[in-house]
Amino acid sequence: MTTLRGGLIQMGLKGSTDDTPENITKAMLDAHLPLIDEAGKQGVQVLCFQEVFTQPYFCPSQDTKWYAAAEDIPDGPTCKLMQEYAKKHSMVIVVPIYERTNVAGVYYNTAAVLDADGSYLGKYRKTHIPQVAGFWEKFFFKPGSSDWPVFNTAYCKLGVYICYDRHFPEGWRALALNGAEYIVNPSATVAGLSEYLWKLEQPASAVANGCWIGAINRVGVEEPWSIGEFYGQSYFVNPRGQIEKEASRDKDELIVHDMNMDMVREVRDLWQFFRDRRPDVYDPLTAQE
């Protein structure tokens, strides 16, 4: 059996949203580093954090102060630090942060992917950007068009899909068709309307595409915004759509799980969804309105 040891870290905000983005980044990194080291001790091969992991989920506001939270990828301080930890622990690390570009006023919700030797493999920029009450993401993020990259890491073929993206089945399918065996979905989602979807969509996407998925959510309530509780429950789901390991609802936590990667081929051979696709009749799905 070929196994892949995955790790997911969920965490509540450290510090206050009244503080500067720079200070919050420091507090969040200080809280993550011991868990990264613990993941290394446990032999984690692929580790992922939650969406915009160095900051609060600031999108309930429309405050330009949060632009200062953005960093360059891969040359910003957080990516550089994570490259050191990836190399230290021979661990692939997915680093979801707010990305600054060299075009003034253009920012992305991005995840950098670092290989086990600390090298930078590339990035995925969140494709689907919501714009509804409490989630004013278009104020902060330009939609990405990353062409569904799959990263050939030291341990697996890895895809990334970010939070709201998970509601769109097209991206899961594109990543799987591009070769992804394991897809991570760093998120920031709160109790209420979409909570029941949390354990419905990713398992359905896992079985539809015959892949493993690691779903990560933050925990706690972030004041002064009253959009609800981030309910954690990060988990690993197998290609049969079964959740195999799940985190708590309300605690900072590293969860570690051994994934049977042979199951990817077994499930794809069994269901043959890729063989039986009919892209020749799907043109209306991509027609411009």
Image (cartoon, rainbow, N blue to C red):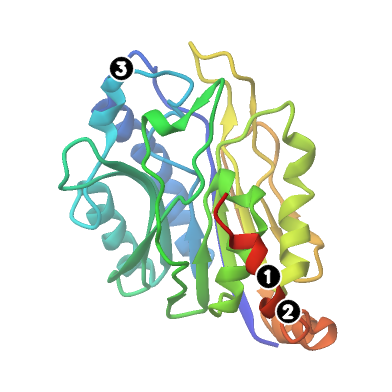
Would you name the residue on which mark 3 appears?
Answer: 19
Residue pictured at 27% horizontal, 38% vertical: 70
Q: Along the polypeptide, which appears first: circle 1 or circle 3?
A: 3
Residue 221 in percent (x, y) is at 57, 21
Determine the image quadrant of residue 69: top left
How many discs mark residues in the rendered view? 3
Give how far apart the Cα atoms at labels 1 and 3 are.
49 Å
Residue 171 in percent (x, y) is at 58, 61
Residue pictured at 78% horizontal, 83% vertical: 276
- Relative depth, front residue between 43 and 63: 63
Which callout, 2 or 3, points to the residue nearer the camera?
2
184 shown above or below 163 = below
Q: Is residue 238 visible?
A: no
Task: Check the picture and name the quadrant holding the N terminus.
Answer: bottom right
Would you name the residue on which mark 2 appears?
Answer: 278
Would you name the residue on which mark 1 appears?
Answer: 282
Near mark 2 (Cα within 10 A), the count class, few <14, some 14-19 or many ≥20, is: few
Q: Along the polypeptide, which appears first: circle 2 or circle 3?
A: 3
Near mark 3 (Cα within 10 A), the count class, few <14, some 14-19 or many ≥20, is: few
- Relative depth, front residue between 170 and 67: 170
